[in-house]
Amino acid sequence: MSNTTKPTEVAKNAAAPSTPIPLTRKPVAAAPTSVVTAPSGTASKTACIRTFGCQMNVHDSDRMRRMIQDAGFAEVQRYEDADLVVLNTCYVRENAVDRVRGHLGELNRLKKEGRVKKVALTGCIGAANESRELEKQYGIDLVLGTHNTYELAQFVGLPGMDETFTPELPGTEGEHSAFVTIMTGCNYQCSYCVVPSVRGRMVCRPMENVVEEIRRLVGSGTRYVTLLGQTVDAWRDPAGSGERFCDLLERVADEAPRVWFTTSHPSNMEDRTLRLIGEKETIVGRLHLPVQSGSDRMLKVMHRGYKSDRYRRKIEVFREAVPDGTLSTDIIVGHPGETETDHEETLRLIEDCSFDSAYVFKFSPRRGTEAAALSADPSGTVPEDVAQRRFVEVLRAVEQNAFRRNKSKVGAVEDIYVRHGRTGDGKAVGETWSGHAVHIPTEAQPGRYVTATIESAGPHVLYAGDPAGRPR
Ligand code: SAH
Ligand code: SF4
C-alpha cells in the first residue's frame, strides 16, 4: 500500500473509533480562490469574481475564471480595482440574498463613481425570478442562471460556446484538488428547496466523459477528486449502460489517488456504495448524508421520501462498513408545522446516529416553494425565538457527540492530506483518511501527505503534533 492511500489496518485499529469534520454551517461566502495574472502586456482589463454558496458554485466560478482569463482579464481581489465584477450567487436561504444585495448596492455606487464598469450576476439568484428586480434596482449588466454560465464567454469577448455542463471547461485542472460535476439539477421536490427551480431537473454526465476528465486531472497532478452534484447517488449512466453511482465511484476510485463525493440523498444511497467506501483504499471514509429532520411527520411534510428508521439503518450499514469513518448531515429547524415533539425526535436521531458534524439551518422561506406558502399561514409558523432555541439545542447535541468521538482519536497516528497550507504563524489544515479535519504544524504544501500523532481534540477539529518524516 502506498503512502497516499488509506492507513493499514494496524494504524486504523491503533487509531480507535472515528470522528468529525467541523463546521456547524456550510461555508457561505468563499473569497475569490486565486489570482490569475493575464499574459504580460494584456493585463489592462481586470475582473473580480466573488463566490457565494456551495461547492457547485465554487466549481462554476472556476469555469468562469477560466473564461475571463482566456479573454485577457487579470483577476483582482477588490471591487474598486475591477473593470468587471462577477457575483456568483447562492439562493438557498433568504439571508444569502440579503448578503448579495449588500454587495450589489456597493457595486452600484462604484459604477456611478466610474470605478467599476460592468457587473454580472450569475448562479442560483441569477436563475430565480427575483433576479429581474435586482437587475433593475441595481443596474446589473448581465444576469445568467446556472444553466447558461457559458454566455459569460461571449460577454467578455470570447467566441460563444455551446456547452451543456463541465466537459470542455474543467474547473481546477492542474491543482492538487479538483471538483468534478457528475450531475446537475435535482428531481426531488423538497418542500423548502429552490434548487429544482433554479438548477432544473437532473442531468447526468456520461460515465466515460467523467472518467476521461479524471484521467486528465490526475495526469496533470490532481491528487484529490471530489465528485459533485445535488444528489450524486441518484446518478445513472445516461448512455444506458445501466450503471449506477456505485459503479461510477468504483471506476473513479481506481483512477484517482483520493476521492470523495457530495451530496447524497438517503433515498438513493445504496448499501453497496456504503460498503465500497470501506473497501476502497482511495475513498475518504466520510459520508455526508442530509437527514433534515428526525420526525417522520416532518419528513413527510418536506417530501423527503424516507422515514427516520430507514435513515438509521443506512447509518448502521455505514458505521459497520467504515468503522473509523465520519458522518455529517444537514438539519433544518423551524420548518412550518414543526412541533416540540418533532424537534425532540430530531434530537433523538442525533443521539442515535452520533454525527461527527452537522450543518444546521434555521428554516428560511424561499419564494415559490411549498414551505414558503405554508409559512404565510401564521398558525403553522415556528416563532423566531423557538426556532433559535431549537437551533442551539440541535447544534449542542451534535457538538457533544462530535467532541466525544473526537477525543477517542487522541493518540492515533494518522496519514494526513494537507488541504490548506500554513498561513502566517497558523497551522496547516489537513484531512485524515477517516475524513477528520486536523490542524497540523507543518510547512507542507497543499496536496502533500504528512504522518503525525493526534495530540488533542475539540468538537470540530483534531490537533496533531509535529509530523514524523518528510511530506510526501
Ligand atoms: N441537495 C442537497 C442539499 C441542497 S441545499 C440535499 O438534498 O441534501 C443544502 C442544504 O440547505 C439542505 O440540505 C438543507 O438542509 C438546507 N436548506 C435548503 N433550503 C433551505 C431553506 N429554505 N431553509 C433552510 N435550510 C435550507
Ligand atoms: Fe433541494 Fe431536496 Fe433536491 Fe436536495 S434533494 S436539492 S434539498 S430538492
Image: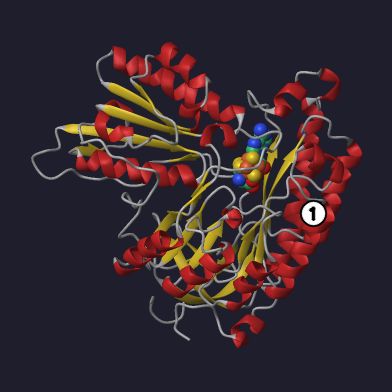
User: Closer to the camera, 315 or 399?
Assistant: 315
Residue drawn at the location 76% of the way across and 56% of the way down: 400
Q: List x then y, in percent, for residue 323.
A: 70, 74
Residue drawn at the location 69% of the way across and 38% of the way down: 190
**Ligand 1 location (quadrant):** top right
SS category of the residue bearing label 1: helix
- Mark 1: amino acid: Ile
Image quadrant where one finds the C terminus = bottom left
Count the marks: how many? Answer: 1
- Image quadrant assignment for residue 197: top right
* In this rendering, position of residue 208 left or right of residue 84: right
Q: List x then y, in percent, for residue 255.
A: 42, 72
Is residue 446 at least partly visible in the picture?
Answer: no
- Image quadrant assignment for residue 436: bottom right
Which residue corresponds to mark 1?
350
Q: How many neighbours does mark 1 have within 10 angstroms: few (below 14), some (14-19), or many (20 or more)?
A: many
* In this rendering, position of residue 226 left or right of residue 338: left
Q: List x then y, in percent, for residue 461.
A: 60, 60
- Image quadrant assignment for residue 42: top left
Is residue 4 at least partly visible in the picture?
Answer: yes
**Which residue is most to the front?**
240
* In this rendering, position of residue 366 left or right of residue 259: right
Q: List x then y, in percent, for residue 158.
A: 21, 36
**Which residue is most to the right?**
341
Question: How is the structure coloured here?
Answer: secondary structure
User: Closer to the camera, 241 or 351?
Assistant: 241
Q: Is residue 230 above or below residue 105?
A: below
Q: Is residue 312 above or below residue 188?
A: below
Residue drawn at the location 91% of the way across and 40% of the way down: 341
